Each structure stands twice: as C-alpha cells, then as structure tokens.
Image: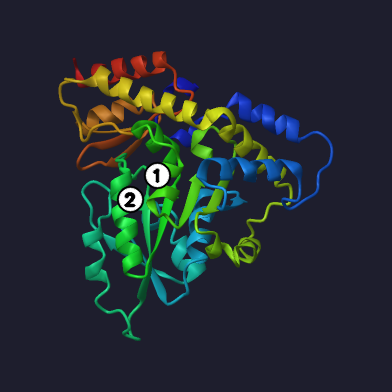
Amino acid sequence: MDSSRFFASDNTAGVHPAVMAALAEANAGHARAYGHDPATDRAIAAIRGVFGAEVEPYFVFLGTAANVLALRALLTPWQAVICTAMAHINTDECGAAESLIGCKLFTVASADGKLRPEDLDPLLRERGNEHRVQPRVVSITQATEIGTVYRPEEIRALADAAHERDLYLHMDGARLANAAAFLGCSLAELTTDCGVDVLSFGGTKNGLMFGEAVVFLKPELARHFKYHRKQSMQLISKMRYIAAQFEALLTGALWLENARRANAMARRLAAALEGAPGLTITRPVEANGLFVTMPLPALKALQQDYYFYILDEAAGLARWMTAYDTAPEAVDAFAAAVRRVLGG
C-alpha cells in the first residue's frame, strides 16, 4: 500500500527531509555520550528559546515514556492522576503509568475530550483519608484524543484550579504543534504562559524519526528527573540523534510549517466530504484529525484500499489523520473513494 493511502495516524509518515539531513550531520564523527555533546546543548537552547529561558528539557525515546516519566517526577505511589476517560495515558499506554509508577488514574467522562475546573472537586473529597489514593496531578492532552483543542484561557483556568488545590498540571503535548498552529499561538502561550508545570512535547508525530522531550516548565520539579530517566531505561547514550532532530524542528519554525500543513489537509478532507450522503463529521476540524460516522459496510469496503482506524464498529465511527507530508492529491483521491463507497 503506497503512502497516499495511509490515513490512520501521523505516526505512519516518514522523516522530514530537514530532520533526516540533521541526523546525517549528527552522524559525522564522534561525540561525547549521554547528552554531553554540542548538538544536545543546541537543542536545549532551542527548546528554551520557544518555551522560556528557565525551563529544563530532557530527551527520551518514546511518547509513552515521556508521559510516564513526567508523571513519575510528580507522584508517589499512593497518589493519583486526574485525566479524561479517553486520555492516551488511560486507553493506549497498556497501563504503563499504573505499572511503572504504582499510581492510580482517576478518569472523568468528557464528551469533547477536555477536563474543566469543576471536574476536580468531586475527586478530592477523600483527601487526607489514609485509606484512599490521593490525587496529585491533573493531566490534559493537547490536542485531545478526539481532535479538540484547548484554548489558552481553558488551560489557564484549569492550571489555576489545580494549583489552588495543591495539584500539578501535566500536558501530554504529542500534538501540541497542531494545536498551536490551529490557534495561531506560540508554544509558550499554550504552556508556560498558562501555568502548565510539566510538558511531554511530541516530535515523532511532527516529522521526527523518533524522540520526545519532557520539558519542566517549573524547573524545580526536575530535581531528581535525571535519575528517573536512567532508571527507566530512557537515557540514550547517543543523545545527539534525538537532539539534532529537535534542533531542526525548532529552528526556523519547521514545527509550525509541518503542523500547519497537516491541519490544512484535514480541513481539505472535511471540505471535500461536506454533504456526502450517509457521512457525518462528528465535530469541527481543529487539528489534523477527522472523526466521522458512516455505515460500517462502507468503512470496511474503504479499508480494502486505505489504512485507517475504525474506533467503534457499532457506531460506525472512524478516525482519519493527516500528516505533514499528506499531499492534496492524496486527500482528494481519498475523498472520492469515500463518496464511491457511500454510493454517491
């Protein structure tokens, strides 16, 4: 199946040429290991350039590792994380947080994928009861698992509510770039400026080969993180290869260019399918995902030629994702195929 037929995830895209060139450049010669190299120094400076001069970034391999280690730095095993029921840490990380931290997840039902300040207090009524797990962290996803985007004022309100209750705010920013591109905000305006404490900053979904960053926006929270990272087997010896990618992504705003293109292709697909018989776009397109319902037989027929996920067979709910390298012609061809299987 050629690349024009992949609409399952932005993880299926290849490496951006500028990032691949940065990897090739990093591959020349020898460098000190474990992050004590010039490329890592430059990447850290680049991250501080977009999130703030005082932030403390640490590179890891994987998104799940970024989330779990960020939470581990904030939690003890008798404490809990408040998140939505559909949060990635709850549904798609194989219980990694519970297994590796020993914490509990308190989940909140949410029709739009977002947490709100009023969701917190019902989960805090047993604070101080030694028989109960104690909430300590609020975790949000930007953009959410159903493609919705938190506005800055929503994040600030949640951060204020969390801090007033002696809770930390963690952001799973696997698609933070897409959210920022949609809102026309800087990365700092959606994180540092809103009071987020710790960020899992995604790179793999936005043109990197591999690599994520745990960014402590409150640097005092990073005091023991280097030990957490090593003990959790995420201290890469040849760190220059992750660092070089982030340097390329954040230099010259490649992150924004990639996110804008991915978002634009999702909007193009939505526009091409407007009014298609039997198809409903379940919510406005804000990031780079389109969530639709249509008859299951039509979805199954479409999967004969295209790779994507059916999230709920009973409801006929599917997710179609675009990436930084999704071509307009591929979108148009996919839209035409959707209309064919729908019979019009």
| Foreground pick, 143 / 101 | 143
**Relative to 80, residue 319 above or below:** above
Which corner quadrant of the image does residue 166 belong to?
A: bottom left
Query: How packed is label 1: few (under 14 Cα within 10 Å), some, or many (20 or more)?
Result: many
- Residue type marked 1: Leu
Per the image, the residue denoted by label 1 is 190
Is 278 left or right of 269, judged from the image as shown? Answer: left
Q: Do tag 2 and tag 1 residues touch (Cβ < 8 Å)?
A: yes
| Foreground pick, 223 / 146 | 223
Question: Which residue is depicted at the point 47% across and 74% down?
Answer: 76
| Foreground pick, 236 / 1 | 236
Q: Quadrant of the C terminus?
A: top left
Tell me the element at label 1: helix
- Residue type marked 2: Ile
Tell me the element at label 2: helix
> What separation in Å lies between label 2 and label 1 (alpha carbons)?
7 Å
Residue 1 appears anywhere in the view: no
x then y, percent, for residue 75 = 47, 70
Instruction: Indicate which disc residue 155 carries.
Output: 2
x then y, percent, for residue 164 = 32, 67
**Relative to 280, residue 211 above or below:** below
Query: How packed is label 2: few (under 14 Cα within 10 Å), some, or many (20 or more)?
Result: many
x then y, percent, for residue 18 = 62, 26
Question: Which residue is depicted at the point 60% across and 36% down?
Answer: 209
Total marks shown come to 2
Instruction: Indicate which disc residue 159 carries.
Output: none
Question: Which residue is depicted at the point 41% across and 73% down?
Answer: 79
Along the polypeptide, which appears first: circle 2 or circle 1? 2
Residue 29 appears anywhere in the view: yes
